[in-house]
Amino acid sequence: MGTDRLTIPLAEPGRVPEAERRALAEAVSRDGYAVAEVRPPGRDTRDPDPLVVLADALGRRQLHPRGDRFGIIGTVTGGDGREGHELSPAWRDHVDEYQAVGPKDVGCHTDGAFIDGPGVAPPALLLLHCARPADAGGESVLVDGATLFDTVRQADPRLLRELMREQFTFCRDELVAVNQPVFRRRGRTAVGVRWRFDKAVYGTRGALRAARAFHDGYVRTAPRTEIPLRRGEILVIDNLRMLHARKESRGQRVLRRAWIVDAACEPVANLVDRSAHPQAYQAFAFYQPLPRGPGREPAALSLGVKVAVDGGLIPCRADHAS
Ligand SMILES: O=C(O)CCC(=O)C(=O)O
Ligand SMILES: [Fe+2]
């Protein structure tokens, strides 16, 4: 498919060398994604998890309620009708509820679109580690939000204005991100995308009309990159720019996922140092970042859809910098 693969040999266990880290960060900043394979220094089975090693080279991992304590979510689909999650048992009862659990295709989306709260936001990056490819299908699919943004801007500025209005609500599990724009300004030079098109989305009639117009007229027909991940490969995706999807699969497929937190999201504390939080606040705790790994600053990444500094390209007030 023409996608470059970066091979990352580790000279020492658990640590991505600086040159490879820079090359990876550059590829993700430029293209919105990269495919990498981490080669451990030896055949020692105690070598650290390649997904954790690569994630920690990029930033801080973010927890997920159905992930493990390292922030890793494993999904096992297919094979003898045993849909479910060997790696993350909490998924097992939710095969019907969460589309990504089954063998069916999954539509274009941003991960964590329903997250918005004190100290938490959708992850900046997601990493998908192919532990076992399907017998057939299961390819990862990417659609570039930069192309979508540009196309809508030129073809239908009024629709872009609607997509930049705080009028879309995303709800899943115990979380709801109320009144979000699909495209939100991030500082002066970037825009972040937040998107899914399914039962998790709510809005007024006007908002839903805009969502349908965006889906039917742009997302559905946008150019896409298909990536058939091979065993051991890790797909790193800029979640603030790229929409990802997945094709239907046959046979057992094992995929492991990690999230990297949005560095623009600052930690939040209680005014009077209250340690027992009310239930509503507790929901956000499931998505907290893990502490940073020892001795390393996060990688220098430039994420999201890049826009002109003067903001003149964007047909609405630049009232949100997150
Ligand atoms: O199964 C896949 O390839 C990806 C599913 C997905 O969207 C996710 O885990 O975030
Ligand atoms: Fe996803």
Image (cartoon, rainbow, N blue to C red):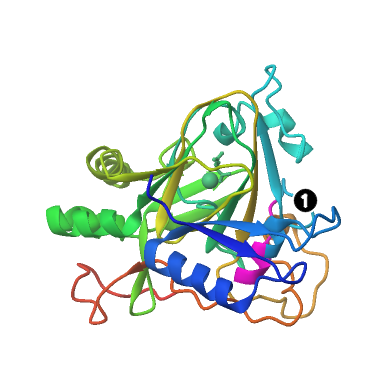
Q: Position of residue 248 (x, y in %)?
A: 49, 28
User: Would residue 150 be visible to someone looking at this image?
Assistant: yes
Q: Residues within 10 Å of mark 1 (few under 14, many from 20)?
A: some
Q: At 52% across and 51% down in the image, what residue appears? A: 111
In the rendered view, would you say 71 is above or below 262?
A: above
Is 108 on the left or on the right of 114, as rendered? left
Is 317 on the left or on the right of 114, as rendered? left
Q: Position of residue 240 (x, y in %)?
A: 44, 61
**Which region is colored magenta?**
54-64
In the rendered view, would you say 286 is above or below 98?
A: below
Is residue 268 shown in magenta? Answer: no
Q: At 26% across and 37% down in the image, what residue appears? A: 216
Say which of 201 and 295 sits in front: 295
Q: Where is residue 32 in the image (x, y as percent from the top left)?
A: 41, 61
Is residue 62 shown in magenta? Answer: yes
Is 102 on the left or on the right of 290, as rendered? left
Instruction: Report the amino acid beneath label 1.
Output: Asp
Q: Regarding mark 1 in the picture, which secondary structure is present there?
A: loop
